[in-house]
Image (cartoon, rainbow, N blue to C red):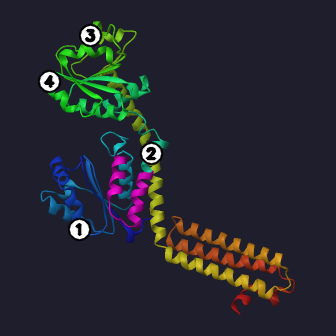
Amino acid sequence: MTCMSNQVVLVELNYEVTPIRIRECLSSKKEEVVNCFKPIGKIFVMATCHRFTFLTLNIVEESLIQSLKDLVPELKRKHLLLLNGEQAVSHWYATICGLNSRTIGEHEVLGQVRNAFTKSEQLGPELNELVKRAIHVGKRARTETGIGRYATSLTSITRDRIQARYPKTNELRVMIFGTGELSRLILQMLRGLRVNQILVVSKELTRAEGVCTESNMEAVPLTEASQYFDQVEVVIGATWTDQYLLMEQDLSNTAIQLLIDLGMPRNFDPIINKSATVQLFDLNTLNETVAAAKRKRNEEVVHVEKIIHQEVKDYFNWLNFRMLIPEVQSLRAEIDALFDRCCLKVYEELFYLDAQEKRQLVYRLRGLAQQHFSRIIDVLKSDLPALQKATSKLEILHALYDEVEDVWQGYLTYDENDLNLFELMSR
């Protein structure tokens, strides 16, 4: 049951509905984007290469849209994804789980929302809780399902192949052919694996030198690459070439054991695959792995959606319950007052009980008070209509009074008509 006085609003520009020129324009104005919303209210902003997401509560979406239009005049309503209530929260959770990414189940978005949350200003308890719960949902999706278990990019497949062959990557020596976009992604991955040495081979030495940014990286001209084959265990091909860069005869007396060919045309002679000592993977085998991984990830979507559905419900139950805090405090005070009056009567009226019996009675009454208060809280937290909640709450309160009287009467030694609990409390 969505609480309208705490309405969640989501406005998003993403790769599916927003032209890249508009996303680029906003990306170059990140500081202005954050500052333009300050007069409106508290808003959480997450910016990635594929989306800008704006989350808020109790702010009219038109105000948010107008602020964006002031920054990017060409922005149209059709360029935006507009959601509110449970749909907004469900989409938000799905995004953090990687279901709305180009690569389903990708991990980067979870780190991106963590980073944005760390840098965000004070959001208020409701919005703060929404972001924290999204991070929790993202973790659940990746630990309780296989949505992020299967590598679905050439870079991640390459990483998995290397780690499977060489668990101790800090002792590994790698050579990579190429300095283009794919090569740079591979280099970034290799740095993450903390490999011992990286040799970057290029026809133009200056290009290789340009990507060698760390002390364990060395630029090698293409004409001298064969001189280093005995110094590396892994060779990766990620460049364009009209002839093979590595032939079967080049492998004699080398340290090479793993070849990964990401080139098209192929960088390495495919006949190498017949070698008993060297393992070769090319785009055919790697793409088959990617396709299988994507199928497996898609099969996990339904399990992630079940988690999201439950977590959305839990958030709105939490949000609605916050609206009942004054009533809960009043109920707590009422039950505490009943307990205090009972304790007073124990010591004033039941003078014939010894100290141990009085303590037992007080202990029993305290347990009853806490038990019934917990039952009332459970009723208020439940997703029942308001009228049914109120009715159930009153029934529990009446049951508490009745049960306390039963306990009380059990300790009375004279006619119960002479001393009624409600009469005692009304004196």
- Give the mark toward the camera: 1 or 3: 3
The disc label shown at residue 141, or none: 2
Left or right? Give the position of 400 relative to 125.
Answer: right
Callout 4: SS: loop
Distance between the Cα atoms at labels 4 and 3?
A: 21 Å
Q: CA distance from mark 2 to mark 4?
A: 45 Å
Q: Tell whether label 3 touches label 4 (CB within 8 Å).
A: no
Q: Quadrant of residue 221?
A: top left
Q: Amino acid at mark 3?
A: Met
Which contiguous range is marked in magenta? 109-136
Q: Position of residue 371 (x, y in %)?
A: 66, 69
Give the vertical position of 255 relative to 317 (above or below): above
Residue placed at 81% from the left, 85% from the top? 350
State which tag comes first along the sequence, 1 or 3.
Answer: 1
Q: Quadrant of residue 177?
A: top left
**Amino acid type, residue under disc 2 in the picture:** Ala
Q: Residues within 10 Å of mark 1 (few under 14, many from 20)?
A: few
Dot 3: what SS? loop
Name the residue rendered at 52%, 77% in the picture.
327
Foreground label between 1 and 4: 4
Q: Residues within 10 Å of mark 3 (few under 14, many from 20)?
A: some
